[in-house]
Image (cartoon, helix red, strand yellow):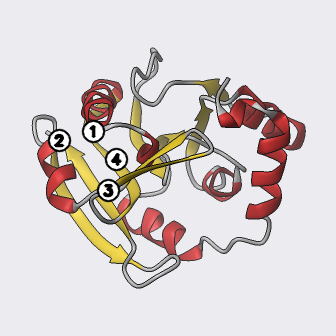
Amino acid sequence: MGYFDNPKNVEQYIEMMRGFDNAFMLDRVFTYLPPGGKMLELGIGAGLDLDTLKKSYDMTGSDLSAAFLDAYRLRDSDTPLKKLNAVSLDIDERFDYVYSNKVLIHLSDENLKTSFQNQARILNDDGLVMHTFWRGRKTETLHGLLFNYQRKRDIVQMSEPWFRTVHYEEYTEISAKDSFIIVLKKK
């Protein structure tokens, strides 16, 4: 059983995120992913981004944790949700955008490359992806969760067969420039 398969851990995470201000990130979403398109969010977690994004996009939320999906359904039974692995992306739908906020950090480099390939597969022509990562080059495990820090050049190299870089920006979440946003366009 994974860490976020435990409803108690999910409750603690949702409580920890209460009041978290993600305005900076969402401003970038609206800047680089024009509203109105069909978007898949990988890893909804507490659902804070999904709550805002569904007002401007045709949203489908996803998570590998049924506990996160169940918690979100208690608040909103209308938004489509899928139990989805961010690597295999076993979904028959097509999207204009794929978005995640510090979700793909839980993938090994090999799985991340496979995820990029599958993101390209489910995107419409000229589709865009926007993801955030912890910046650096290390891996660590906390409560059984992998945290795989990344660098721009590694993400560009992993995604290059399917995507070109549209935007890259470093930002501060906890310490100076500890994070980055990358926007990629399907080739």
Report if the CB atoms under discs 1 and 3 are less than 8 Å apart: no
Mark 1 or mark 2, which is nearer to you?
A: 1
- Disc ID at residue 109: 1
In percent of width and height, residue 67 lies at 77, 32
Q: Amino acid at mark 1?
A: Asp
Label 4: which secondary element: strand
Report if the CB atoms under discs 2 and 3 are less than 8 Å apart: no
Q: Is residue 100 left or right of residue 148?
A: right
| Mark 2, residue position | 158
Q: Earlier in the sequence, mark 4 or mark 1?
A: 1
Mark 4 or mark 3, which is nearer to you?
A: 3
| Mark 4, residue position | 129
Q: Earlier in the sequence, mark 2 or mark 4?
A: 4
Mark 1 or mark 3, which is nearer to you?
A: 3
Q: Earlier in the sequence, mark 1 or mark 2?
A: 1
Question: Relative to residue 143, is residue 162 depicted above or below?
Answer: above
Q: Amino acid at mark 3?
A: Lys
Binning the other alpha carbons within 10 Å of mark 1 as few (below 14), some (14 to 19) or many (20 upward) gives some
Label 1: which secondary element: helix
Question: Relative to residue 28, is residue 77 depicted above or below?
Answer: above
| 79 or 151: nearer the viewer | 151
Q: Amino acid at mark 2?
A: Met
Question: In the image, what residue occupies the spot 32% across and 75% down?
Answer: 170
Question: Relative to residue 105, is residue 66 depicted above or below?
Answer: above
Q: CA distance from mark 2 to mark 4?
A: 14 Å
Q: Quick one: quadrant of the C terminus?
A: top left
Question: In the image, what residue occupies the spot 47% across and 17% down?
Answer: 91
Q: Quadrant of residue 15?
A: bottom right
Mark 4 or mark 1, which is nearer to you?
A: 1
- Disc ID at residue 138: 3
